[in-house]
Amino acid sequence: MALLTLEDITKTYKQGELLVHALQGIHLNVEEGEFVALVGPSGSGKTTLLNIIGGLDTPSAGTAQLQGTDIAKLKEVERSDFRLFELGFVFQAYNLVPVLSALENVELVMVLQGLSAAESRQRAEHYLQLVGLEKEQQRRPSALSGGQQQRVAVARALAAGPRLVLADEPTANLDSENAGALLDLMHQLSHEEKTTFIFSTHDERVMARAERIITLQDGKIISDVRTNKHD
Amino acid sequence: MISKQSHLPVAILMKLAWRNIWRHRKRTLITLSSIAIGFALAVLMIGLGDGGHNSLIRNAIKLGEGHITVQPSDYQQAPGNHKFLAHGASLSAQLQDLHIPGSIEPRIALQVLASSATNAIGAGLEGLGAGIDQRALMLQPSITHGYWLEADDIRGIIIGDGMARKLKVSIGSKVVIMAGKQGGDSQSQLARVRGIFDSKIEALDDYLMLCNISLARLYLVGEGADASLEPVTRFALYLDDPNTMEHVKHQLQTALEDKHTVVLDWQQMMPDLVQFIIVDDAGNYVFLMLILIMVVFGILNTVLMSVLERTREFGLLRALGLSRRYLLLLVFCESLLLSAVAVGLGWLFGGAVHLWFSTYGLDITAMMGGNTAMMGTFMDPVIYTELSWSRITQLTLIIFTATLGSGIYPAIKAARVTPVEALR
């Protein structure tokens, strides 16, 4: 059974008088442990698709299931808990809570999950060490570089033990060197932690690191290629 | 379905809320200062108001009929010279037996016509008991001519300077005091002016005439009373601890009240003064309301601004799995902490202001045009702020509720944030 199954996902919304077809009949299966890149030009539907998978948005039609759970059919409160316990998120920017230190940011999701303070602290320290930020753990986001902030976000996403990590253009605000380093880190952790990653990008240098590249255009999948880049 | 639920410990909630309110330190400090200053002003206004009212009440009680009055049951509705407590001596003994901490002062009150060689005017003749009398103590320092009554002076009277002017009398002048009798007849006694006072209270200076109780009792005898039973119009009770008034009143009602005798407290004896204080208090509450509006908008502005600035952050928190309920609680806790700090600072400022004015007072004579008389009594020229525990609780609750209430709308607004729109 695939980890993620999307069947005939359609998303239509109104923009003024105009009806926008953001997604049109998306079918997709993602297996556990895959490192998948969603690529395509701006407006192709990458973010909308990630939002639907992440339970942040609901499809106009079709079903999105994560290991048998129909995400769209969950109630508001259930979707919130679903995101908390099943998913990890890395966004393009504004990833961290400004009033919390790097360590507290990583701890937050685990605290929300109900883990003990000691266990949350231990896991947060471990994952910050994995992303190479053990010395910066007491710093607040404003005292971290853009690349460091994204690494904290990756540590937070993984520390809570999700089935699936969704990253929406995580490298968009980073230079090539930092973008490459972040993707290498995500790739490495994906294998070490056996966590499934789906990330969107339109940066060709970044997509080159993916094991599977799904290309979207005008809300449709126009190609789905496995690159066999398993380490 | 998802069986696990999110959980946000109170300590983390409070830590987040506390750090959030200090995100814009200057803005928070300005808001807190405006609330604290507003609160200090409210404390001063209410404290001065209560101080002034209590001063009026204390003086009215001393000049009037005490904290509690025992008098004929129908006297309050229709006063009359023929209405008196015939068995004054036995009532006095009953009162003494109750061992009420304070003083019990027998008095005779009569409505009379005072006539001099040149004029005649209506007057209130008050016969004072032989012991210490609070009213006498209050008026003795106001004597401007002559001297106070000797204990054995059965013809002496003390009058106000207003009455002296109207009657055109001076020390030693003869005044005929005539009182109507039940049935239409009248009875008169001759008296001499021993002293003239100037209390600055027009109602007293123009109308009040004081004498020893023995002179006033002659009129009750004329109404058929037995002098040996020491009849009186009323007993005025001055309590050492005014806070025991309700308890003592109940005690007296149980012991003394019957169809001829009634026990009344000062509020029942002086309903006009009570009404005046209620109306004056209403003015203070209007002022308090204005301060509250300022406080509410101060908090609303700070918390709402901070919510609107953090839409993306709320979207992130919602995306990470923080429920709407916890987000609402988080913003509400920010208001709660802001309110708690504001009330704390408010009391620090307000308390300091109160401490100053309760120690050094505020001289109001210039503000009152040199005369602090009102409602037949007077306010002490220097007002000291007074704050009772009930006022402290009331002010704290009002400000706290108002500040907390002003955080409801921003909290609801924050909880309505949808992650997909916030993060777009």
Image: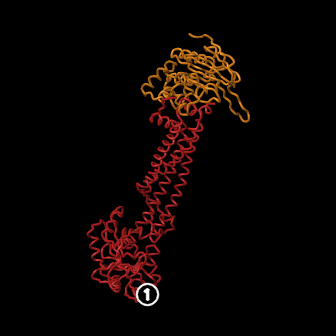
Q: In the rendered image, is residue B22 in sight? A: no
- Secondary element type, mark 1: loop
How far across and how far down the image is residue B228, in percent? 27, 82
How far across and how far down the image is residue A154, in percent? 54, 22
How many residues crowd mark 1 within 10 Å: few (<14), some (14–19), many (20+)? some
Observer-nearest of B201 and B97: B97
Disc 1 is attached to a residue of which chain?
B
Residue tagged 1: B116
Observer-nearest of B378 and A189: A189
Figure quadrant of the N terminus of chain A: top right
Instruction: Quadrant for residue A213, please give it.
Output: top right
Furthest toward the right, the residue is: A17
Whether residue B250 sits left or right of residue A123 in the image: it is left
How far across and how far down the image is residue A82, in percent? 53, 28
Q: Colour of chain B?
A: red
Q: In the rendered image, is residue A214 in sight? A: yes
Q: How is the image coloured?
A: by chain
How far across and how far down the image is residue B262, in percent? 36, 72
Observer-nearest of A14 and A64: A64
Give the amino acid type for the residue marked by disc 1 in the picture.
Answer: Ser
Image label count: 1
Figure quadrant of the C terminus of chain A: top right
Q: Which chain is orange?
A: A
